[in-house]
Image (cartoon, grey):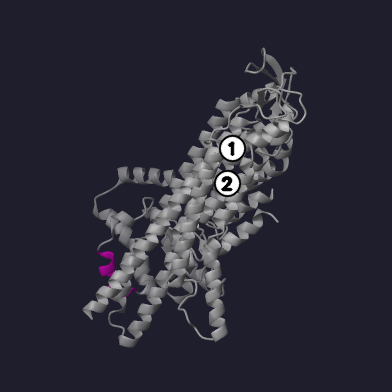
Amino acid sequence: MGEWSFLGDFLEKVHKHSTVVGKVWLTVLFIFRMLVLGTAAESSWGDEQSDFMCDTQQPGCENVCYDKAFPISHVRFWVLQIIFVSTPSLVYMGHAMHTVRMEEKRKMKEAEIEARENKNGGDTYYQQKCSVAEKETKLSGWDEAGGQIILRGSLLNTYVYSILIRTAMEVAFIVGQYVLYGIFLETLYICQRAPCPHPVNCYVSRPTEKNVFIVFMLAVAVLSLFLSLAELYHLGWKKAKERCSRSYKASPSTAPGRLESAPQAERAQMYTPPPDFNQCLSSPNGKFISPFSDKMASQQNTANFATERVHGQEDAAGEGPFVKSSYVESPEVASECAAPAFPENYFNEKRRFSKASRASSKARSDDLSV
Amino acid sequence: MSWAFLRDLLSGVNKYSTGIGRIWVAVVFMFRLLVYAAAAENIWKHERDEFECNIKQPGCENVCFDHFFPVSHIRLWALQLIIVSTPSLLVVFHVAYRENREKHRNQKLYKNPGKIDGGLLCTYLISLILKTGLEIVFLVLFYKLYNGFKIPRIVKCDIKPCPNTVDCYISKPTEKMIFLYFLVATSCLCIILNLSELSYLILKYSIKCYLKRHVKKQQ
């Protein structure tokens, strides 16, 4: 069981940067797969060959029949399944950690630039900040708000791809198990292979107990598959559907522009943008905008901001700058450029769901929320 | 003493590695250490008891097993894991040496003792070359000892005291072969990662040197 701590430590970090459904998936993986495999299933398969009996005294016959009946043992198959199914999450975690590191470097650079500008005079500060910020929108998934990892752009893509690959692996292993062994294990296995002189009856040890575990592990695999699909739906398909339905209802081309600029204008009113705010907005590079960006969500965010301003004083004491994860739909370029003008406590606020938000207010603050 | 010891050592290595180095550590943990400890060990657990020869002559099974498996696959695998991981410790030792030096002289000798430059870069490159070399050595050893990466179902043995050529049967040959291929694949992956890290570092620092010289010339 101790060997699973290798994987457990890695996956705990993934746990921090996952959505609610992702956390449930990880919990299912830890408890119902790793723990059950390590404690119960392995001991059930412990005597699988020593108690595999064939109705013959021919030396070597039992060996070759066991090898034919079980090319790979169930337990080893499940170990490989857990490892391959967890690997995409680790790739996502690597990307997230890389983003964190890049953000730390960016903050150091900004601090250096600020120190330099303070010596030379502050004329070019905002222009430099905007150019740095525009460059840094290329590094997706980071927002100034409270040092949080935001799922967007390439980080969101990595997350979605990791779930897709995980789903594919899950399906592959379930199908593989069915192809190798079917669903249930039979008590009797009839074997005809040299050096067995004739077809011999071989008896599997503990078939019922093994069947219980096989069905259990199959059910957990199907549950994990379902959770992965639910997470995919939760992340993307809903938004794609909304975008499709909105594009059908779409009015003239100015309306979307108005919709997009409306929340920004409101925010501009609330937070007094710097003089060349519009310059920063002039060329949003479509390549780096999240495929899941959503105008409805931006409007909702405006409501959230208003609520947060109300709650701002309560949360100002807040928790220190540690990395929390929340998923926020926001116009990328605007947030970076407008950042200097935001009030101080904005960065320390915990992102909370407003009553206007459709999402559950029971979600924890360190969840990636959609 | 268990694999957790190696894991703790390698976690220390992670701090002073490049991005590719971190991927290498993750591959070693996930695909080699974990697979070894959780799966492979149990396959080879009773290999001697399950090795069966078609003869009642006492001692025949013993000598035949010893002839075909001078070192068991699983023991060689464990040795490979340990020996291939240890060159990374050179980097950790060098960083510790740097920090010790700073402490003794009570002054900041290095901008960042963990940054890969100067002497630490040489140590890092040497550790990469050693790791790659040792991986290749072990792969060749596996190939030579067992005549390729196949595990036969039946082997013919005629060593004394076996009176004639006897058939001996190896247990779980298919499963052992699957994991042997897995071992070879992960070794090759680690070799590729080491070589790409080596070329990345050499390229990065040659460009850095070239640019420095270029700037100096311009000045």
Left or right position of B219 against A311: left
Residue A239 visible within the image: yes
Residue B21, x across and y down, in percent: 47, 58
The residue range painted magenta reads A273-282
Residues at marks 1 and 2, common chain?
A: yes
Q: Is residue A54 left or right of residue A126?
A: right
Placement of A230 over or under B100, stated as above or below: above
Chain of the residue on which disc 1 is drawn: A
Name the secondary structure under disc 1. Answer: helix
Q: What is the three-letter code of the residue carrying label 2? A: Trp
| Label 1 Cα crowd, 10 Å radius (few <14 / some 14-19 / many 20+) | many
Image coords of residue B94 (percent x, y)? 53, 70
The amino acid pointed to by label 1 is Ala
Earlier-in-chain disc, 1 versus 2: 2
Q: Residue A134 versus residue A212: which sits nearer the camera? A: A212
| Badge 1 vs badge 2, beta-carbon distance below 8 Å | no
Residue at (38, 83) in percent of width and height: A115
Instruction: Tell me the distance, in whole angstroms, between the alpha carbons under discs 1 and 2.
Output: 10 Å
Relative image position of residue A56 (x, y in whole percent): 74, 17
The label on residue B24 is none
Instruction: Please name the residue shown 65% across and 58% down the image.
Output: B5
Disc 1 marks which residue? A221
Eyeballing the image, is A333 above or below A213? below
